Amino acid sequence: SVFDRDRIIDILPKSLAMDLSICEFRNMITQIPFLKRSPKTFVTQIAARLIPAIAKDHELLFLQDDLGTHLYFITIGSVRRWYHHNTNQENAYELPLAKAGSILGTEALFIQ
């Protein structure tokens, strides 16, 4: 494409690339309480690795027992979550909505 973010970031000096990432995701960073309270060095490291994504209605992000590989920062809208005691759908119940400011997939922080 004409605008390849990753290639541009890769050729910039590291400090400029990190500053650019912070600017690019400033609105999201200020909406997520966890990031708002975190040290700037940590937020800078996270921002450099963010990839914007939009989930469609009824799109499945991950299953309950999936190995955590990604963090999802919810900035607009909400995500429905379900808990299953086992594979029997009758034992499923809905958890509270994950709304703007929520983080999903936090298990990924501890695995990688």
Image (spheres, rainbow, N blue to C red):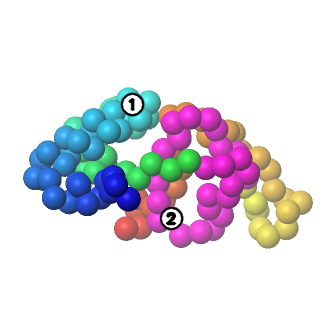
Where residue 21 appears, as percent x and y from the top left, is: 27, 44
For mark 1, what is the residue?
A: 27
Q: Which residue of the protein is positioned furthest toward the front in this rendering?
A: 2
Q: x and y percent of residue 18 in the render? A: 20, 46
Percent position (x, y) of residue 67? 53, 70
Image: 7 above or below 102: below
The answer for how far apart the CA atoms under marks 1 and 2 are is 25 Å
Query: What is the magenta range?
Result: 55-82
Residue 33 visible, this angle: no
Principal SS element in the magenta part? loop
Disc 2 secondary structure class: loop
Which-is-in-front pick, marks 1 and 2? 1
> If the image is split into quadrants, where does the C terminus sit?
bottom left
Q: Nearer the viewer, residue 89 or 76?
A: 76
Above or below residue 15? Residue 90 is below
* Residue at the spot 72% in from the left edge and 55% down from the top edge: 83
Mark 1: give few (<14), some (14-19) or many (20+) Cα within 10 Å: few
Residue beneath label 2, please? 68
| Picture coordinates of residue 98, whole percent (x, y) | 62, 40
User: 91 or 78: nearer the eye?
Assistant: 78
Q: In this view, does 79 lie above or below 37?
A: below
